[in-house]
Amino acid sequence: MSAMRRILPLLLLFAFGARADYREFAVIPRDPSIESRLKMAAAATFKAYPKLKTEDLAITVVDVTNPALIARGDFQGDAKFYPASVIKLFFMTDVFATHKEHVPDVDRALKEMIAVSDNDATAYIVDILAGTTPGPPLSDRALRRFVDRRREINRRFQKLGYTDNVSAMMKPWSFGPFGVDKQALGENRENRNMLTANATASLLLWIVRQRATGSHEMMALLQRPLAPQRAEENQVKEFIGESLPADARLWSKAGWTNEVRHDAAYIELPGGRKIILVIFTRGIADDVTIVPAVAKNVLAEL
């Protein structure tokens, strides 16, 4: 790709303004070299994990080593997945975008939501963002009002260009949902949270480039030592961090259930390479080696 072709999208980024987010990401052309390498990394992964179906892996890479020559590529980056706790990146971003960070206890909830992926803290934040109150099942009119308030979170991201690749209106649960939250999910779980690897990479790019409101504070929340002191703060082992050299630096948010296993990270590697790497997997979530294996394959190819 010529220098002019790579610089032109950068000029377009500034034309969208500071609130453009996904549109900023979309105008960065896919780099054929990155995409070819991701296909090889995916092929190596499928060979090593034959139970992993083709449609159950998504990878997105954004190379931000040179801010003037940002490049990206993906393997099925627009495929829709249940995001598990990776959706907490969007809740965190919405807190700062709506200036809710100074609401009592939100600062503590943010730390618990990101550092230890606590679902109770996340539930508190979701209700703050939507102006909803948990409780027993509601009647039709009250339920419609409740769901519409939750959808306001989605509408804010839609204004940022996330038209059909993000749904962030439900609380992550360990054993629920219950009451009105179960109603809001829908009979066929049609309001379930949803995310793509590309949408996640876009959000991280917005934060890493210090263009999102509260970027500095969010980077501090996301930073992870590769040898965490507290076991409950370990989103390194069994995730992307496990595949990194000891002198790398990591900012990340993982997510996992009995259905999916994901990680989304900004990485600074020895030698100066800086990349955003998002890995989504589905169907073999009980295999804790899958995400670090994909990350190793990607880094080996890059």
Image (spheres, rainbow, N blue to C red):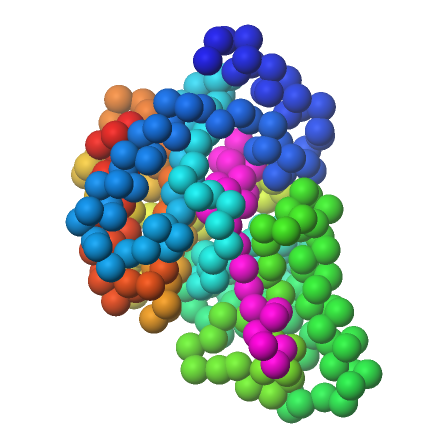
Residue span colored magenta: 186-209
Q: Is residue 11 left or right of residue 109?
A: right
Residues 105 and 245: in front is 245
Can residue 175 be seen in the rendering of this structure?
A: yes
Vertical placement of 66 versus 113: above or below?
Answer: above
In percent of the image, x 33 and y 41: which residue is there?
A: 250
Q: Is residue 212 left or right of residue 300?
A: right
Task: Name the outermost residue toward the right.
Answer: 141
| Image quadrant in which the C terminus is located | top left
Q: In the image, residue 239 lies at what x, y percent?
A: 28, 52
Q: In the image, residue 221 lies at what x, y percent?
A: 45, 50
Vertical placement of 267 versus 151: above or below?
Answer: above
In percent of the image, x 57 and y 33: which residue is there?
A: 25
Q: In the image, residue 254 lies at what x, y percent?
A: 38, 55
* Count of all numbered marks drawn on residues in the image: 0
Can residue 227 be seen in the rendering of this structure?
A: no
In percent of the image, x 47 and y 58: which residue is there?
A: 81
Vertical placement of 288 versus 200: above or below?
Answer: below
Residues 39 and 100: in front is 39
